[in-house]
């Protein structure tokens, strides 16, 4: 199996882990991750699933990249649509497979939340390491950062805050309370990035995946 194919396989596995991590965080019923906050709130208000709204929101992210990058938008990045289909579909499949998971106590909810953050962090590390393709949520942040000449980290933080704030406003508008947002949203926002850094430093597999680029 050549290195390029192995990189693609690890990339897809990372996407699958991302979807599972988001589901575990969501199942904790303490609020979902910032990137999923808007689709999650919308899924309560309209007859579409979390995965379906994730697909629609990510399409907007891809369209935003095209508008911001214009001629610099590489045609290969249109494959983000394929990634979007896989990711969104896996969210709904995982939600169905984990339908039995309904933690009813705070310790159980906390365990589901922490497990989800760990799985999501590993998935992000595994997705980024092979450097195959930009995913929509990361792609729009990169496009905004390059257009506004701001650092990626600062732009990512502002982008996540904007998503959560928009979700909160819609939640108050639709339900007159915070629905689908909570302490878990804050914890995942603060924890996942740190866990990604930890995975990159401590898990030899991530370094091995990254080295596959050198074999191409």
Image (tube, grey):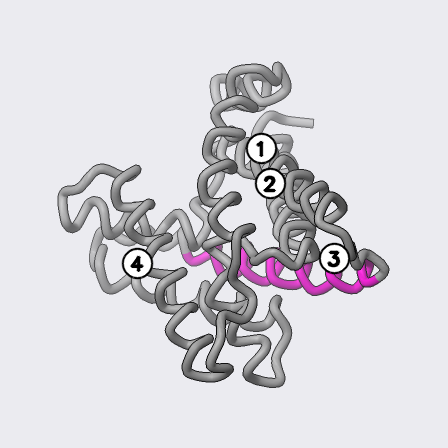
Give the image location of residue 101, x and y in percent: 81, 56
Q: Which mark is residue 126?
A: 1
Q: Residues within 10 Å of mark 1 (few under 14, many from 20)?
A: many
Ranked by sequence position, the earlier of labels 4 and 1 is: 4
Report, in whole angstroms, how far the alpha carbon at label 4 lies from the one at label 1: 23 Å
How many marks the image carries: the answer is 4
Q: Residues within 10 Å of mark 2 (few under 14, many from 20)?
A: many
Ranked by sequence position, the earlier of labels 2 and 1 is: 2
Report, in whole angstroms, how far the alpha carbon at label 2 lies from the one at label 3: 15 Å
Magenta stretch, main secondary structure class: helix
> Residue at the front extreme?
106
- Front residue of this view, candidates 69 and 108: 108
Query: Which residue position is annotated with label 3?
Result: 94
Query: Which residue position is annotated with label 2?
Result: 117
> Residue at the right extreme?
100
Label 2 close to label 3 by CB (< 8 Å): no
Mark 2 or mark 3, whichever is nearer to me: 2
- Front residue of this view, candidates 113 and 85: 113
Which span of residues is magenta-colored?
78-99
Identify the secondary structure beneath mark 4.
helix
Ranked by sequence position, the earlier of labels 1 and 3 is: 3
Mark 1 or mark 3, whichever is nearer to me: 3
Q: Residues within 10 Å of mark 4 (few under 14, many from 20)?
A: many
Label 2 close to label 4 by CB (< 8 Å): no
Query: Which residue position is annotated with label 4?
Result: 65
Identify the secondary structure beneath mark 2.
helix
């Amino acid at each position: 199996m050549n290195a390029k194919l192995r990189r693609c396989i690890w990339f897809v596995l990372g996407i699958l882990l991302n979807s599972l991590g988001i589901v575990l965080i969501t199942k904790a019923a303490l609020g979902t991750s910032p990137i999923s906050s808007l689709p999650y709130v919308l899924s309560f208000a309209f007859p579409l699933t979390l995965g379906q709204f994730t697909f629609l929101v990510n399409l907007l992210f891809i369209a935003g990249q095209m508008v911001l990058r214009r001629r610099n938008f590489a045609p290969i990045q249109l494959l983000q649509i394929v990634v979007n289909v896989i990711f969104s579909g896996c969210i709904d499949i995982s939600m169905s497979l984990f339908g039995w998971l309904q933690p009813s106590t705070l310790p159980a909810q906390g365990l589901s939340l922490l497990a989800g953050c760990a799985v999501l962090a590993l998935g992000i590390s595994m997705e980024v390491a092979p450097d195959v393709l930009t995913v929509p949520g990361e792609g729009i942040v990169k496009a905004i950062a390059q257009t506004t000449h701001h650092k990626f980290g600062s732009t990512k933080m502002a982008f996540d805050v904007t998503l959560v704030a928009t979700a909160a406003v819609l939640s108050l508008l639709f339900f007159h309370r915070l629905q689908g947002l909570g302490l878990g949203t804050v914890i995942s926002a603060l924890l996942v990035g740190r866990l990604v850094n930890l995975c990159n430093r401590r898990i030899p597999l991530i370094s091995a995946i990254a080295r596959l680029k050198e074999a191409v």
